[in-house]
Image (cartoon, rainbow, N blue to C red):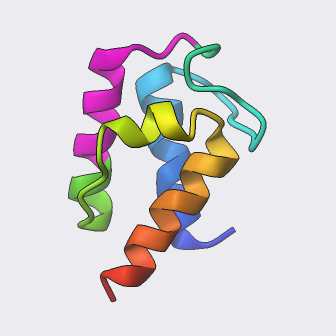
């Protein structure tokens, strides 16, 4: 897994208090809510230097989809 992917995983693990996150995990099924979305977006801005739209979580609620979208943003910022 890349450093970027590791940081995205860490954001979900930290905010959702989830010891493990897999590509099939759904943010909302793991107990996520709108306040947690803001925490993840803030974490990713600080850690990766990207602006993730809050609606991205609703558009891509599974971790694998979300990770791919954020990785694409990071690549676009390089």
Which residue corresponds to the image point at 40% horizontal and 69% vertical from the top-left?
Answer: 73
Q: Is residue 50 above or below residue 52?
A: below
Give the x, y percent position of residue 35.
Answer: 27, 17
Is 57 placed left or right of 50 in the picture? Answer: right
Q: Is residue 51 above or below residue 16?
A: below
Where, by quadrant of the figure, is residue 36 drawn? top left
Instruction: Please give the count of numbered marks on the rendered protein.
Output: 0
The C terminus - image quarter:
bottom left
Which residue corresponds to the image point at 55% horizontal and 48% vertical from the top-left?
Answer: 66
Q: Is residue 19 above or below residue 50?
A: above
Question: Which residue reaches farthest bottom?
Answer: 78
Give the x, y percent position of residue 69.
Answer: 52, 59
Q: Main secondary structure of the magenta part?
A: helix
Q: Report the span colored magenta.
A: 31-43
Is 12 placed left or right of 2 in the picture? Answer: left
Magenta highlight on residue 61 = no
Is 46 placed left or right of 67 in the picture? Answer: left
- Depth check: give the residue in front, 71 or 21: 71
Which residue corresponds to the image point at 47% horizontal and 56% vertical from the top-left?
Answer: 7
């Amino acid at each position: 897994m890349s450093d970027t992917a590791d940081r995205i995983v860490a954001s979900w693990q930290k905010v959702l208090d989830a010891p493990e996150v897999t590509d099939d995990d759904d943010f909302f099924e793991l107990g996520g809510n709108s306040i947690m979305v803001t925490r993840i977006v803030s974490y990713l801005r600080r850690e990766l230097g990207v602006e993730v739209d809050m609606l991205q979580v609703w558009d891509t609620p599974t971790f694998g989809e979300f990770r791919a979208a954020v990785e694409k943003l990071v690549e676009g910022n390089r």
